[in-house]
Amino acid sequence: MDELVRICGIALVALLCLSLLRDKAPSMGLVLALGVTAVLSAVLIPLAGRALDCVRVLAGAAGLDGAALTPVVQVVGICLAVRISSELCRDAGERTLASLVEIGGAAAGILCVTPLVEQALRLIRAI
């Protein structure tokens, strides 16, 4: 909970600074947004690690092995990276680049889950 309060506080202060900077120095707004992204990433990485540990414990309790869980975790990571990257592109005024990042993320996600889908199809055929 403390991390969430810290994240929201940093985001609100950054938002205030960004709104003041965008009118006077738009290029500095992007630099500030990138810097805040780096700071928030540093706060979020340990939190994400703890969440991943919880998912591993739950998967172990359910009898799932790591091979079944890995593609799901990879896709979640891809989604987060694509979301942040595309929003930064939009903030910089590059909508086309943001769309291309999203298309690349979708393709990467499909490639990550392909082994899981193949495994599911083998199970269905065996029944």
Image (tube, rainbow, N blue to C red):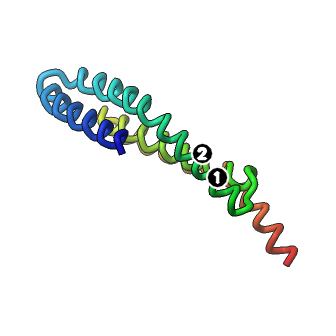
Quarter holding the C terminus is bottom right
- How many residues crowd around disc 1 within 10 Å: few (fewer than 14), some, or many (20 or more)? few
Which residue is more in the foreground, 112 or 62? 62
Q: Residues within 10 Å of mark 2 (few under 14, many from 20)?
A: few
Q: Is residue 126 above or below residue 8?
A: below
Question: Mark 2 — residue?
Answer: 53
Dot 1: element: helix
68 left or right of 13? Answer: right
Residue found at x 73% / y 59%: 64
Tell me if 49 is positioned left or right of 60 in this view: left
In this rendered view, identify the residue nearer to me: 44 or 26: 44
Q: Verify CB contact (< 8 Å) between mark 2 and mark 1.
A: yes
* Residue type (three-letter) at the residue carrying disc 2: Asp
Q: Position of residue 49 (x, y in %)?
A: 55, 39
Q: What amino acid type should be assigned to the residue bearing mark 1?
A: Val
Q: SS class of the residue under badge 2? A: helix
At x 80%, y 74%, the residue is 124
The reply, left or right, for residue 64 in relation to residue 84 is right
Q: Which residue is mark 1?
A: 57
